[in-house]
Amino acid sequence: MPDAIGIVEMFGFVAAMVAADAAAKAADVKIIAIDTNKPANAEKEEVPLITVVKMQGSVSAVTAGVEAAAAAAERVTQLIQKHIIARPTDDTQKMAERTSVGRDIVGQIKNNA
């Protein structure tokens, strides 16, 4: 059975780094990805960067990690959502490991000027 996956969504990359650090210190979890969402209209509108920290481990460890990350995100900016997937399917596992960090370099993504 695959390890559980924890997902914590917040505003801002700094909050994501603080949340990932808190999760890793609070529980035996592996941070598998930090993902960002930059909408196509972000240049025209004032849109905050939405960031997701994804972690993996036992259900109890991920639960503790998600709670620590969520509390840290609330202290820095704002928590949007948190969720735990206890028994991810293989396809869910693949999606959890995907990340956009590093792909948002100018010219790498269409509409990213």
Image (spheres, grey):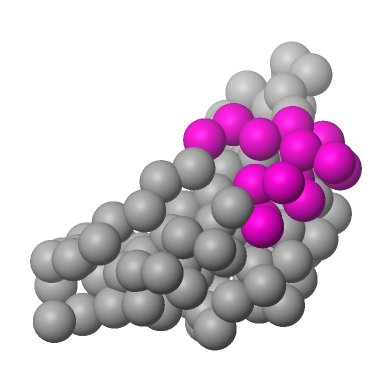
Task: Find residue 104 and report its horizontal and vertical position in percent.
Answer: 64, 57
Instruction: Please tell me whether residue 96 belongs to the stretch shown in magenta.
Output: no
Q: Foreground: 95 or 53?
A: 53
Task: Find residue 82 and report its horizontal and vertical position in percent.
Answer: 49, 43
Q: Quadrant of residue 91?
A: bottom left
Q: Write the residue at 82% across / 36% down.
A: 77
Q: Is residue 96 visible?
A: yes
Q: Which residues are magenta?
A: 68-81
Residue 90 against residue 86 in the figure, above or below? below
Q: Foreground: 49 or 52?
A: 52
Q: Foreground: 36 or 28?
A: 28
23 relative position to 8: left or right: right
Query: In terms of secondary structure, what is the magenta stretch mainly?
Result: helix
Q: Quadrant of residue 113?
A: top right
Q: Write the residue at 59% across / 31% down.
A: 80
Q: Write the residue at 36% across / 53% down.
A: 84
Residue 12 against residue 109 in the figure, above or below? above
Q: Is residue 101 visible?
A: no
Instruction: Please tell me whether residue 70 belongs to the stretch shown in magenta.
Output: yes
Exactly how many numbered labels are in the figure? 0
Task: Find residue 34 and report its horizontal and vertical position in percent.
Answer: 59, 63
Residue 46 against residue 68 in the figure, above or below? above
4 relative position to 44: left or right: left
